Amino acid sequence: MIVVMKVGATTKEISGVISRVKALGYEPHLSEGEERTIIGVVGNGNVREYREQFELMDGVERTVPVSHPYKLASREFRAANTLVPLNGHKVGGKKIAVIAGPCSVESREQILEAAHAVKEAGATALRGGAFKPRTSPYAFQGLGEEGLKYLAEAREQTGLPVVTEVMDPALVPMVCDYADVLQIGARNMQNYTLLHAVGKAQHTVLLKRGMSSTMEELLMAAEYILSHGNTRVMLCERGIRTFEKYTRNTFDINAIPVLKQRTHLPIIADPSHATGHWEYVEAASQAAVAAGADGLIIEVHPHPEEALSDGMQSLTPERFANLMKSIKRIAEAVDRTA
């Protein structure tokens, strides 16, 4: 349930509602808009039976039941887009954010070369995996903390914030020390212990959709993070598993406008994992921007033929620079910037 306060409700009136929510055994979640304040009432039990009590309280305009199982992620809770700060920009606003870099941090030289290249082309942030979940236990698993240190050095040299994956709740504090954005990979979307941990960390989170997960399951995963008061959450559509064999995944372009309608959280598209082939990444990126995505996350490697992971879907710096030019034209056509 949502408690909508009157325009001009006082701090005392808002505090009174919050106290009443807590007294009933529920968790209050405050959303302060330009005109009015909204208080989400979240928890187990039939909160609707208390609607009349809240509507009689000073400063309350009305209460609204939430029809979706995801409460805090819904447009009902927050009608305006949530804007997530990233490198001086607000992801979810008019500007398209572009997160770029290699799948894995392989060496100091590699990540620094990639970072400078994507910076020069106009990227918003640097991506790179220090810890890599791989299907095969014999595949390259990442450099761990050493890789995080290289990412931090790349940020120092370029000014680009760092986006990197965290796989274990125990590693969240360490990754927070180095990274600006914690990525939850597709394989960990429903790792609820990890979702609780990143929610408690109050760090910006990029949550990827699981390869066989519905949009509602993605939103429910986001709800775990939001339930801890961490509102800096970005959702990522990276393709889902279908019967198709010519691409790595099937890019669910439908998910972008559907999610934009249902949630206030920014939507990032991952055309690299969605297609699995560098030849298709530019076209999929253009489609994502046209469909309303708030950002892109793209794999770029200085030498894809030498990559220890995902070389087939990685762009060279030159191809990435060309992609940046093309998506700027698409962004302008849909009244955005890139």
Image (tube, helix red, strand yellow):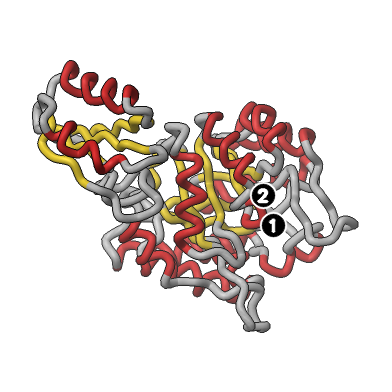
Q: Which badge, 1 or 2, is on the more N-terminal residue?
A: 2
Question: Which residue is found at the position 23% from the left and 36% from the top?
Answer: 50
Q: Is residue 273 left or right of residue 41?
A: right
Front one among 333 and 255: 255
Question: Which residue is found at the position 26% from the left and 61% from the top?
Answer: 335
Asked if residue 232 is positioned above or below residue 243 in the image, the reply reads above
Q: Which mark is residue 140?
A: none
Residue 23 lies in what quarter of the image? top left
In the rendered structure, which amino acid carries the disc numbered 2? Answer: Ala
Residue at the top extreme? 12
Where in the figure is residue 190, as x and y percent of width and height?
A: 60, 52
Would you say residue 329 is visible in this rendering? no
Q: Is residue 133 left or right of residue 248?
A: right
Asked if residue 157 is positioned above or below residue 235 in the image, the reply reads above
Residue tagged 1? 301
Question: Which residue is found at the position 60% from the left and 34% from the top?
Answer: 197
In the rendered structure, which amino acid carries the disc numbered 1? Answer: His
Tag 2: Cα neighbours inside 10 Å, few (<14), some, or many (≥20)? Answer: many
Q: Is residue 72 left or right of residue 59?
A: right
Where in the figure is residue 272, as x and y percent of width and height?
A: 60, 65
Front one among 109 and 51: 51
Where in the figure is residue 38, as x and y percent of width and height?
A: 23, 36
Q: Quadrant of the C terminus?
A: bottom left
Q: CA distance from mark 1 to mark 2?
A: 6 Å
Front one among 99 and 37: 37
Residue tagged 2? 114
Q: Quadrant of the N terminus?
A: top left
Tag 1: Cα neighbours inside 10 Å, few (<14), some, or many (≥20)? Answer: many
Question: Which residue is found at the position 50% from the left and 58% from the top?
Answer: 217
Q: Give yes or no for contact between labels 1 and 2 (Cβ–Cβ under 8 Å).
A: yes
